[in-house]
Image (cartoon, rainbow, N blue to C red):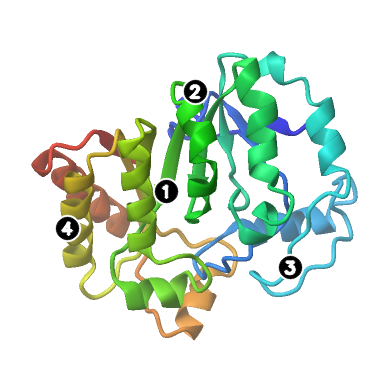
Amino acid sequence: MLVKRSALSAGGSGKDLSDGWVLNFAVGCTHGCLFCYVDRIWRLHSKNRHSPYYGLELGEWGQYFYVPSDLEEQIRRTPWQRWRGARVLMSSTHDPYLPELYFPNKWPRRILEAALPRGVRFTVLTRSALPTQDFDLYARYREHIMLMSSIPTLDDAFAKMTEPRAPPPRARLAMLRKAKELGIQIGIVVAPIIIRSGWREDLERLFRALAELGPDVVFGESLHARGLNLARLEAAGVEARVGPSMDREVGRVFEELLREYGLRGAYW
């Protein structure tokens, strides 16, 4: 069964992305974002004798990537009707639209084709621009799907450094603009907001672009120290500031910008 319980819901961590369900179908993520903390999760799994991922061979984050050999069978066997009417997050521990997941098997599309006709509702969270390949499907089930993109910055050079193999932020905005034109629900997750020189100006520039786009919802979150993410950023020359006081400051600025630009959303 692919769908699992998750804390990413309004009743759990306050991250209103699902009704408490998440769908992950790969291990690792080839975007290799320096700030990502998911590597820590897989390393814990690989050391836990009771985990199905015990003994998994892991290299550097962004370099290892595995898809279950029986994924086609798992899609077929999952009782999708069990989640009729429920909102499921796709995905929380990897990008669901990685090139390696879409070509040649089109795994995200095949999952949606199996689940959407049975009434499952989805929040698709991605840094990729590949969902455009499936906009015919999204438009057909527009009442059951929201496309959300993670866009933490409009600074192309900074994005290239911190999200080395993800499409540029403006490509993600263009994807969302096209989705909105088709009547598809869209949202933005501004995360992680990395506190560095010029972060406020960068955030306001992003909000101006979001106000022009007009998404259904905008969420935000600052960077938190987890696993090796701060060490990776520091090795790349990024001096990120973290901590409770920094988090409160980012939250204050974020919520002010939501009000100023008339956007609906929340700071996590």
Q: Which residue is mark 1?
A: 149
Position in image of residue 3 (x %, y %): 70, 30
Q: Which mark is residue 204?
A: 4
Q: Secondary structure at mark 1?
A: strand
Q: Is residue 157 left or right of residue 29?
A: left
- Quarter location, residue 28: bottom right
Q: Earlier in the sequence, mark 1 or mark 4?
A: 1
| Nearer the observer, 55 or 139 | 139
Instruction: Examine the rendering and report whether any part of residue 102 can be seen.
Output: yes
Q: Nearer the viewer, mark 4 or mark 2?
A: 2
Position in image of residue 252 (x %, y %): 20, 48
Q: Earlier in the sequence, mark 3 or mark 4?
A: 3
Amino acid carrying mark 4 in the image: Glu
Amino acid carrying mark 2 in the image: His
Instruction: Examine the rendering and report whether any part of residue 268 can be seen.
Output: no
Q: Is residue 101 left or right of residue 54?
A: left
| Nearer the observer, 231 or 213 | 213
> How much space separates mark 1 and mark 3, taking CA atoms?
23 Å
Q: Quadrant of the C terminus?
A: top left
> How much space separates mark 3 and mark 4, taking CA atoms?
35 Å
Q: Residue at x 35, y 45 (%)?
A: 178
> How much space separates mark 4 and mark 2, taking CA atoms?
31 Å
Q: Secondary structure at mark 2?
A: loop
